[in-house]
Image (spheres, rainbow, N blue to C red):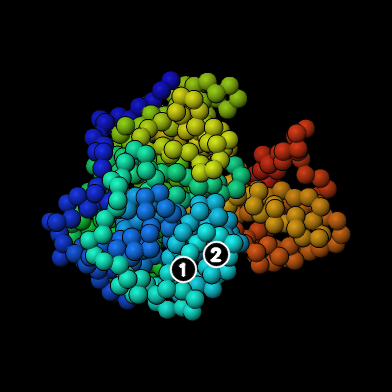
């Protein structure tokens, strides 16, 4: 059974991403486009367009051309948008990296993506310079000043204004973004998204969100993540509204900015929704203008959704998607008639879905659980340099296998109930078990290991390691060892020693057996508490 969106298809224009985002910008050139939250520094649409023009000229002066890759390794600041759209307008590719990455993690992405230029913050410059060794990166540009790097000020001053791409971008073929995702299994892979993929997704969600010129939205979601990149950065600018940037999440600052700018909407992840529902500091801020909270990137339980709505006094709803789908496939509109508590929403226009049996891959009936398969114009072209992983993710009929288990009810509302994917969702960030296992195995005391997600009230999931040891070692020693190598959000936060790691005859770790064991223990603790 193929399930289709209950909404009519929308027109997807054959234009570049920047053309689509700034299509109507002439109407509001003197309105704020971006505000730097911590300082209040404002960039209007006119100033943003001028800065994009300068960045484009600087890139052309460096020989940056169609198909070349630039890496953005930075927290959210207004200039992030200028570089991103300048690259897009030249037919280049933005590969976005998590600023919490260590040098080794960043180096892997730089090598795999074949990035030519790296743009970062001065506080990250040392790490960035270390990561570029042995890669194709020719220049590191920093916001501010840092030894061994080009300052952003000198970068924008180095090229002629009005510089354009030598060749017109082909929206259906040319990549515009190359974020990295773990997909359903394994290590991070470059997700190839064309201009048309992202434009399609923006068109698909346009009618669902009534953001208007003059509105402000606090950009707490990182721009390197597909959710913040498309839904917030591109989506809000498309509508002539203003993004108030935050370099990192701080609850008090987030609440202050939301109150000060009278934000009507918030795009969040479940841990932030939990803070809104539970933290006493929320009561000290005026959030009366906040009307809609949308949570994504990880499932949120019905109880949290309802408690957050009651605390804030606004509509709290969910969406669903994945990097490989640019990202949105399901969304809850602002009309309460299209909302179901605990649901991730309805299919967006131009999108089809199948729910299939986990073993047979045959479609199941409405209400029955199965893996969600997605087909639509927002689905990626594949994984960079990884045809095998691409073939596993997208079948011959064009269906993207999400690795998430859910069901659809008779009215077309979808619910996510489990995950086949091996990666762990820590506060909305993807953590690949295989990566942590690889790190653990470099410790002299570790003979074998397996990492699984463990439920956590605040983070959603945390990495837990089951370890077979060669000799005595403490849990704390192993956790500290891993923490010294990986980004902070990837840290192993629980260790259990075990006699043997369950594996299939082919040697694959049977993670689901360990997950089932952990869940049964949790149920016992709840029953006995």
Decide if residue 497 is in sight here.
no
Residue topped by disc 2 = 132
Image quadrant of residue 10? top left
Spot occupied by residue 154 in the image (x, y as percentages of width and height): 35, 75
The front one of 3 and 337 is 3
Image quadrant of residue 277? bottom left
- Residue 81 lies, with reference to residue 127, above or below; the image says above
Spot occupied by residue 396 in the image (x, y as percentages of width and height): 49, 25
Disc 1 or 2, which lies upstream in sequence?
Answer: 2
Q: Residue at x 46, y 78 (%)?
A: 146
Q: Residue at x 57, y 69 (%)?
A: 130
Q: Residue at x 30, y 51 (%)?
A: 166
The front one of 140 and 341 is 140
Q: Residue at x 50, y 52 (%)?
A: 113
358 relative to 211 in the view: left or right: right
- Residue 353 lies, with reference to residue 204, above or below; the image says above
- Residue 203 lies, with reference to residue 105, above or below; the image says above
């Amino acid at each position: 059974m193929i399930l289709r969106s209950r909404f009519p298809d929308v027109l997807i224009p054959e234009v570049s991403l920047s053309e689509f985002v700034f299509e109507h910008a002439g109407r509001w050139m003197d309105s704020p486009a971006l505000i730097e939250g911590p300082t209040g520094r404002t960039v209007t649409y006119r100033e943003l367009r001028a800065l994009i023009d300068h960045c484009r000229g600087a890139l052309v002066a460096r020989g940056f051309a169609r198909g070349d890759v630039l890496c953005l390794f930075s927290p959210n600041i207004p200039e992030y948008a200028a570089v991103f759209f300048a690259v897009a307008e030249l037919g280049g590719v933005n590969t976005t990296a998590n600023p919490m990455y260590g040098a080794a993690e960043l180096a892997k992405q730089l090598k795999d993506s074949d990035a030519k230029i790296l743009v970062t913050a001065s506080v990250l410059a040392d790490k960035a310079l270390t990561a570029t060794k042995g890669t194709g990166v020719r220049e590191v540009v920093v916001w501010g000043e840092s030894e061994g790097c080009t300052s952003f000020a000198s970068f924008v001053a180095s090229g002629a204004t009005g510089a354009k791409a030598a060749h017109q971008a082909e929206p259906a073929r040319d990549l515009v973004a190359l974020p990295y995702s773990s997909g359903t299994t394994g290590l991070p892979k470059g997700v190839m998204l064309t201009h048309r993929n992202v434009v399609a997704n923006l068109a698909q969600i346009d009618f669902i969100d009534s953001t208007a010129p003059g509105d402000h939205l606090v950009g707490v979601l990182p721009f390197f993540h597909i959710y913040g990149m498309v839904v917030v950065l591109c989506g809000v600018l498309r509508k002539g509204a203003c993004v108030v940037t935050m370099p990192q999440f701080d609850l008090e600052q987030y609440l202050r900015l939301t109150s000060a700018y009278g934000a009507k909407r918030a795009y969040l992840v479940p841990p932030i929704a939990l803070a809104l529902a539970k933290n006493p500091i929320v009561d000290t801020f005026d959030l009366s203008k906040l009307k809609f909270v949308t949570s994504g990137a990880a499932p949120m339980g019905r109880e949290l959704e309802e408690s957050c709505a009651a605390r804030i006094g606004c509509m709290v709803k969910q969406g669903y998607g994945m990097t490989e789908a640019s990202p949105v496939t399901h969304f809850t509109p602002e009309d309460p008639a299209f909302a179901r508590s605990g649901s991730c929403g309805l299919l967006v226009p131009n999108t089809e879905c199948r729910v299939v049996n986990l073993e047979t891959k045959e479609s199941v009936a409405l209400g029955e659980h199965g893996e969600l398969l997605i087909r639509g114009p927002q689905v990626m072209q594949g994984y960079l340099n990884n045809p095998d992983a691409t073939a596993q993710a997208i079948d011959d009929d064009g269906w993207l296998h999400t690795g998430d288990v859910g069901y659809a009810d008779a009215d077309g509302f979808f619910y996510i109930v489990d995950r086949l994917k091996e990666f762990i969702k820590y506060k909305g960030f993807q953590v690949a078990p295989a990566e942590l296992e690889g790190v653990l195995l470099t410790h002299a005391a570790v003979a074998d290991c397996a990492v699984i997600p463990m439920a956590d009230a605040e983070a959603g999931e945390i990495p837990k390691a089951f370890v077979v040891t060669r000799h005595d070692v403490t849990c704390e020693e192993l956790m500290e060892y891993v923490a010294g190598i990986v980004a902070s959000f990837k840290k192993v936060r629980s260790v259990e020693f075990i006699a043997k790691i369950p594996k299939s005859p082919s040697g694959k770790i049977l993670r689901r057996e360990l997950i089932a064991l952990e869940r049964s223990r949790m149920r016992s603790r709840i029953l006995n508490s």
